[in-house]
Amino acid sequence: MVDHATREELVEKYRDPVHGVDVSRIEDVDVVWRNGPLDEALGPERQGFDVCLASHVIEHTPDLVGFVGGVLRTLVPGGWLSLAVPDLRYCFDLLRGPTRVGEVVDAHVRHASRHGIATFVDQRAYAVRKGGRIAWSAADGGTVELMESLADVESLLASRDDDDGEYVDAHVWRFTPASFELLVLELSALGMLDAHVESIHASVGCEFFVRIRAGSGLPATVEQIDAIRLALLERSVREVGAVWATVGA
């Protein structure tokens, strides 16, 4: 198991009941990964996997391209990366909107290993609960309310002078199923990833599930790629638009 912290640190982090985590189920961490490519952190003796499972991980990675590429390099030919991804429509990311490819490219070009101030400001300014929950299903009712105020954002900005360079966790990337599939396609078309979404499933509860394999699988022409992009863009707009009626309901 790979994580950004030791088991003891994770237990302490999630002990607060607001997270709803049974900390006794947190497993031992074999490799603590806080910087650099994943395959380098694992080392050659811990590679050659058939499958990598990453549950609610990809939205936290400062360099999404580096993360996916690093995982794929640890797999045997034909192996796959299996993801459980929070659907922004059904969690505190609701008001932040889907990640676009430019944000991801920028982070990769900068070799980002920490989240920027914009991520923390937006997470505080726009995080919501619905019916008192930070994650919910499509069937759940309740009023949507902001979790924090702009005063909390001011406090965050004032505390930045105390930043010691340690990794601070956040949701930097936000997805619906269609927006995720679009992002992988665009990154592949830009030559930044050699990967494709083999399968993607509709959300269950607050999350959806994705299988990624190496190889871009891109259509032969730019026109074909753009036609797929447009269809996925339209789907992602519809996915997000369908839940706006829940705000304030």
Image: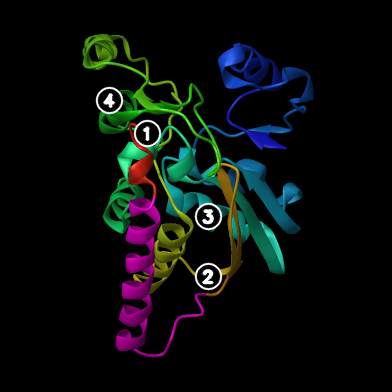
- Can residue 41 be seen in the rendering of this structure? yes
Q: Nearer the viewer, mark 2 or mark 4?
A: 4
Q: Which residue is mark 4?
A: 125
Query: Type of residue at label 4?
Result: Ala
Separation of marks 2 and 4 at Cα, in angstroms: 33 Å
* Numbered disc 1: secondary structure: loop
Marks 4 and 1, how far apart in space? 20 Å
Q: CA distance from mark 3 to mark 1?
A: 37 Å
Determine the residue positioned at 35% across, 60% down.
238
Give the mark nearer the N terminus: 3 vs 1: 3
Q: Earlier in the sequence, mark 2 or mark 1?
A: 2
Q: Which residue is at 31% across, 74% downward? A: 230
Counting residues from the start of the chain, the first of labels 2 and 4 encountered is 4
Badge number at residue 68: 3
Q: Are marks 3 and 4 in contact (CB under 8 Å)?
A: no
Residue type, label 3? Val
Cα distance in 3D space between marks 3 and 2: 11 Å
Alpha carbon separation for disc pair 3 and 4 = 29 Å
Q: Is residue 243 left or right of residue 84?
A: left
**Residue at the image point whose x is 28% and y is 30% from the top:** 122
- Which of disc 1 and disc 4 is earlier in sequence? 4
Write down the residue under mark 2.
Answer: 196
Of circles 4 and 1, which is in front? 1
Q: Nearer the viewer, residue 36 or 114?
A: 114
Q: Which residues are magenta?
A: 216-242
Mark 3 vs mark 1: in front: 1
Residue 132 image point, x, y percent: 48, 21
Which residue is label 1 attached to? 249
Q: Nearer the viewer, residue 108 or 93?
A: 93
